[in-house]
Amino acid sequence: MSNPTSAAGGEGAVASSPAAEKFLVLPVIILILAQMGTTGDNGALSLAASALTSDLGATTSDIQLANMIYPLVGGAFMIAGGLLGTILGWARTFRAGAVVCAAGEVALALAPNMAVFIWVGRVLVGLGASLLVPSILGLIPVLYSGRNRMVAFGCVGAASGLSAVLPLVLGMVMESAGMKPTFLLLAAYFAVVAALSLRLPRAASAGERLAFDGIGVTLAALGLFLFLIGLSNVSAWGLIAPFERCPFTIFGISPALPVMACGIVVLVVLVRVERRVEEKNGIALLPSSFLRTPQVLAGLAANAIMFFFMGAQSILMAPYLQLVAGWSPVDVGVISIVTGVPTFAFSLGIPKLLPHANPRHVIQAGYLEMALALGVMALSVTTDGASAAGVYAGAFLAGMGAGTVASHASNIVALALPERDASQSGGIQSTMRNVGQAFGVALLGAVLLFGMTNAMHAGIASDAALSPEVRGQLSNMSVDLESNDEFERQLDQVDLTKDERDELVRLDAQARFDSTRAAYAVGAVFVLLGLATTPMITKR
């Protein structure tokens, strides 16, 4: 009777034997713990918004960039992580990713300023995730088959729900001990995951010698980096007209769109180059089966939209609740439980209880639930805070939607691909998740900050209650996401009457309210656009 598992150093297909039908429990627990860690890291960053502002002097743009760097770096290198896992073995890349993530968390804990926090700590965590996350998804097609594979993917999807416990624990640590011990705790967590990876199953190598696609890795990293760095800086550099913080211009306009366009051109070149590489070597960074199979494209879209939704929560909900409504990290951590319970239940419950459900209908239901959640979250926003009942209702619906999509998003990709490509697809799936999250943070952050700035400046310019002198002093005023009290402190350096101060506070609150709701609405429309891809889901 052959072993159902494959080599840690060069896994092959799972053997077709009775043993292959037995569900391997320990490996999926290790994969769940790793997935929880990567999700928990994002949760810790959301909880740290107030601490970053007070301890390291972070602005909303800094927090947005810190949220962006992880998916930016991860998105640029996760396809490469998928290829490395195929060549070196998924257990090795899994272990290496956990170690690099631990190092990144230590750098975050010890960062003396936002520059080190973003460009050392967040970059290291992103690089670690580019190895760890594709390995999580790559190990499942190797270790599991048939219904067991669907359940294993559901378990990993449910890990996003289980990880809701981490923000609550991390929020308690952050509130009682501060930001540094919180990130050190995460470093210890990843070190434990690395140690547990030694227990992943081993068996004989498939014996296939595969070449590393250096040209593909370079083009993919460059193209994705250019696209995402342009996208992430739209709100800082400007869309067309350059903002004051724009580092340079291209023919007099903001570099955001030209940099994104260069990235797209490089990615188009990548697709053409990869066709020749695959013909020559038999393996490529981007196998042609990924692009020519409609169901794979629909599955990749599902992965991107699911994490676009998470990006919306990280840039809209958590900062607003902490910076405007005054919620504590523990309060925000409780919301993660409200989201996590249905995420866990739906991710794991749908494959277990409805194994014959049509994946297309499941994904469609998930999109509708996520759009509804964003609508409820928008309605929960008030001019000076948020309605707790609306926040919790939106969070619960969010968990339902995310769990529903997660239950099938990865499996519909694996169903439509040959065995080796299904395993390698973990890299491209992870990349799409990071691109989706980065796009969510960038798009909705830009809608929020653009809307606040434009509405505030328009209000100041047209408000007859303000004197011409005051309007002149505030014509170039920078607008940030902050509470009424924080905004009033900004006004201390401006010579104002009490009535003018009250009017400016009212204008700022209204601009903040309108822009936040508009950003949620844009997010809901984008999620609903995903319905157009679902007719491509045909294999069950």
Image (cartoon, rainbow, N blue to C red):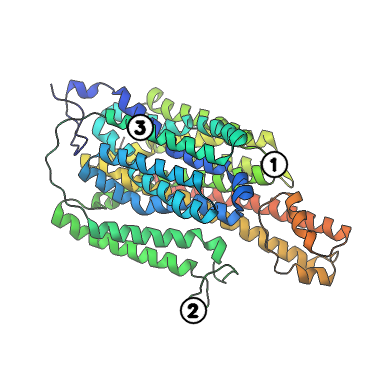
For disc 3, the neighbor class at 10 Å (few under 14, some 14 to 19, many from 20) is many
Question: Marks 2 and 1: which is nearer the front?
Answer: 1
Instruction: Evaluate if marks 2 and 1 touch, with contact meaning CB atoms under 8 Å apart.
Output: no
Left or right: where 237 falls relative to 193? right
* 148 vs 213, nearest the viewer: 213
- Which corner quadrant holds the C terminus? top left
User: Could you say whether the residue bearing mark 2 is in a helix, strand or loop?
Assistant: loop
Left or right: where 105 falls relative to 132? right
At which x and y percent is residue 48? 57, 43
Q: Which residue is mark 1?
A: 326
Q: Residue at x 31, y 28 (%)?
A: 27
At which x and y percent is residue 184? 48, 38
User: Could you say whether the residue bearing mark 1 is in a helix, strand or loop?
Assistant: loop
Residue type at mark 2: give it.
Phe
Residue type at mark 1: give it.
Gly
Left or right: where 304 falls relative to 288? right
Image quarter of residue 173:
top right
Instruction: Evaluate if marks 3 and 2 touch, with contact meaning CB atoms under 8 Å apart.
Output: no
Residue 106 at least partly seen: yes
At which x and y percent is residue 269? 29, 64
Q: Residue at x 22, y 53 (%)?
A: 284
Q: Give the mark nearer the N terminus: 3 vs 1.
A: 3
Alpha carbon distance from label 3 to label 1: 36 Å
* 19 vs 82, nearest the viewer: 82
At which x and y percent is residue 113? 54, 53
Residue 249 lies, with reference to residue 421, above or below; the image says below
User: Could you say whether the residue bearing mark 3 is in a helix, strand or loop?
Assistant: helix
Q: Residue at x 15, y 51 (%)?
A: 282
Q: Which residue is mark 3?
A: 31
Q: Which residue is mark 2?
A: 251
